[in-house]
Amino acid sequence: MTTRIRAIAGHLPERVVSNAELEAENPTWKMEAVAGRAGVVSRRIAAAGETALDLALVAAEKLLAALPTRDSVIDAVIFCTQTPDFVMPGNAHLLHDRLLLRDEVLAFDINLACSGYVYGLAIADGLIAAGTANRVLLATADTYSRLIHPKDRSARVLFGDGAAVTLVERCGNAEGFTSFELGSHGRKHTAFYVPAGGMRLPRSAATAQEASDASGNVRTQEQIHMDGMGVWSFINSAVPKQIRTHLEKNAFALSDIDHFVFHQASAMTLDSLVKILGIDGEKVPRNLNVVGNTVSASIALCLADALRAGRVKSGDRVLLSGFGVGLSYGTTSFVHRQGIDVY
């Protein structure tokens, strides 16, 4: 027995923010050069008052509307986000309420970002293997725009808001997930974090003060602080090793993988992984040019786009790899055999 992805539904905010709009607002940013490294031409940004929960709810409704008996199908809800509606309760319980699911459906949040999709799949796999659930609704959604100072070029050019909801279910071994490799570099947590707003350093007048770094990026302690080169170095060092471990554990060669669906961090990151691993760039689907880095939703949205375009065909082996905040990283793979519904 193993588990597989049955369906994926995505949803993006209506507002599109182009590089031209960012440069008009910030004439010194020179977006043509920035876009070459970031790989992002436009991104979707949530409207005022629109949250990660709102985006995930639309995606979930699309997915569940296609199921014959939506209420009895779901046994568990996992919501992965770093931009929840409240400190408590978690978004999973709010989604449970909005979807009018049964009382017997378990629900909880996980606080992860760019590795969150693979971690969420691993948790869903564990729940199913333990007999606790047969079908798990995994919601991955973030509105990082709420955590970025408008004058922070390093973050604002990269990130977009979005949501993806994935239905994970029990299946036979032929099309299911292989193993899950999960890792952490907690010692590097300050490479990508928001210093203030938690219990360690509550928000105050002092944490709301703006400061500029050596590159002219403006932010407060209540917003994202990202050491881009530090995170890039971590990814280049840790992720290829983890992927090779996954391949060795499952007796695969790199050539056995038909598609490498990476977290859509940046063009520079994806290009670097292609080079370090020595893989064909055509095997690496990308959608960050029009949606940006959508954090926990990025792998699911990219996979859905590749499926929708017919790029991933029956019998193809697909590897998923996410990496980011924590610092954390995770890898898994599966064979696409019986089809994944995309909404």
Image (cartoon, rainbow, N blue to C red):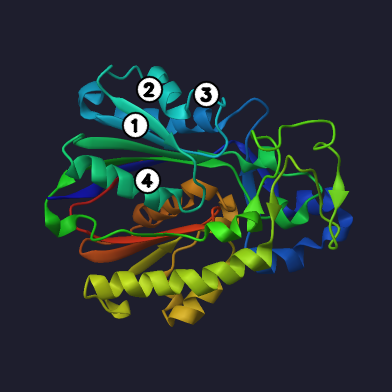
Q: Position of residue 169 (x, y in %)?
A: 21, 42
Q: Nearer the viewer, mark 3 or mark 4?
A: 3
The amino acid type, in three-letter code, at marker 2 is His
Q: Tell me the CA gap for discs 3 and 2.
A: 14 Å
Residues marked 3 and 4 touching at CB (< 8 Å): no
Residue tagged by mark 1?
77
Q: Tell me the CA gap for discs 4 and 2.
A: 17 Å
Residues marked 3 and 2 touching at CB (< 8 Å): no
Q: Tell me the CA gap for discs 2 and 1.
A: 7 Å
Residue tagged by mark 3?
88
Answer whether residue 173 is visible to the viewer in this image: yes
The amino acid type, in three-letter code, at marker 4 is Gly
Vertical position of residue 251 compared to residue 99: above or below: below
Residue 78 vs residue 252: left or right? right
The amino acid type, in three-letter code, at marker 3 is Met
Residue at position x 49%, y 51% in the image: 298
Residue tagged by mark 4?
120
